[in-house]
Amino acid sequence: MENNFFDLKINPENIPHALLIISEDWKETHNQVNLFIKKILCIADNESKSSCNKCKACLTFDVKSNPDFIEIKPDDKGKIGIGALRSDADTSRGLVNLLNQTALVSDAKIIKICKAETLTEEAQNHLLKILEEPSKNSYILMLSSRPYKLKKTILSRLTSFSILPNFLNDRPNKSNIDESIFHIISKEKDIAELTEEEITSYASLFEETEDSLDFYNYSKMRILDTWNDENLVFRLNILKNNVFDEISNNLNDVKIKKRTILSSLEQDGLFNFLEELISFQALMANKVAINKKIQLDSLFDLI
C-alpha cells in the first residue's frame, strides 16, 4: 500500500474544496500530491487508501491525459498569469471550463497549481472568484513555499497543510529518527550517503536547535552565540520549517499546538519573518559577504 501524507490528514469522505500545501518545490512533495490526486480520480470500487492503477482514470492520469485534471505551472518568466487559468496551452482547456463541465472519466475534477506564489495579482483576483463559488465535485490544490505572497482573501478560503517529503525508503534501517529531520537534512545532503553516526549527530543538532526555539527556553543571546557556526544553514532550515508549521496552524485555527517563539507573532508578522528569513538564506546561498551574526540579530529582532 502506498504510504501517503494525505491518508493521515484528510478524511476521504470530506475532502476540502481548496487545499494549500505549504512545502518546498520537492519532487517527493509532488509525488505525494499526485498519489492523492490519482486516488480521488480513481473510479474503481476500491476501499484501500491507494488508487487501483487499472481503471481508465488511473491509466490516463499516468500518461498525463486524464481530461478531468489540469496542472498549472509558472511560464518561462516564472509567473502564472490569468491566461494560464483561462486556457491550458497543452490541451486548450482552461481551469474555468474544466470546473464548469461534467467530469468525463472520473467522478471529480482537479486542478493542481504549482508554485502558487507566482500567481500574478490579476490571476489571483480571477482565482478568488472561483474559490468563492466552488463547483460540485471539484478540487483545487495549490502548492507554495511562500504563501505570504498570496492574497489574504485567498488564504482564508484554503485548508492548509505543511507537508514533509517521505524519506522512509531512504533512511538507514537502524534509525528511529523523526522524519522531519530527514526532510531538513536532505536540503543539504544526500541522505543515502550519510552514516548512522552522522545522522545521529544531525538529530542531536536538531533537538538542540528546536530547544532554543521553545517559547519557554528562548534567549536571543543564546541563539546569537550558538547559531553562528558551520551548522547555520541547517539551523535556518529548521527555523523555516517551524515558520511553515506556525502559518499552517494559524490558517487552520489549530488550538493545541507546539509553543515556540514564533507563537507570539500574528499572521502578518509570520509572513514578514519568513520573507526576511528567505532573503537571509538567499544571501548565504549566493555566498554574499555578510556578517551572519548581525543578520541573525536583525532577523530575531522581528520577534
Image (cartoon, rainbow, N blue to C red):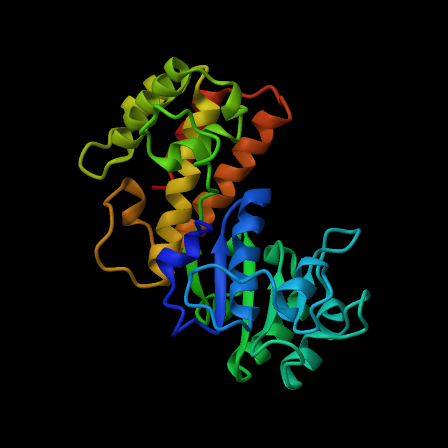
- Where's residue 245, x and y in %? 37, 48
Horizontal side of 83 relative to 252 (left or right) equals right
Nearest to the observer: residue 70 or residue 24: 70
* Residue at screen point 46% across, 36% down: 167
Q: Quadrant of residue 38?
A: bottom right
Q: What is the count of numbered marks?
A: 0
* Residue at screen point 21% across, 55% down: 256
Q: Quadrant of residue 130?
A: bottom right
Q: With respect to residue 32, does 60 lie above or below?
A: below
Q: With respect to residue 151, does 186 lie above or below?
A: above
Instruction: Specify whether residue 149 is in view.
Output: no
Horizontal side of 22 relative to 284 (left or right) equals left
Direction left: furthest residue: 216
Horizontal side of 19 relative to 203 (left or right) equals right
* Residue at screen point 36% across, 67% down: 11
- Where's residue 302, x and y in %? 38, 41
Nearest to the observer: residue 43 or residue 228: 43
Instruction: Specify whether residue 84 is in view.
Output: yes
* Residue at screen point 35% across, 17% down: 201
- Where's residue 36, x and y in %? 51, 60
Nearest to the observer: residue 121 or residue 244: 244
**Which quarter shows the C terminus?**
top left
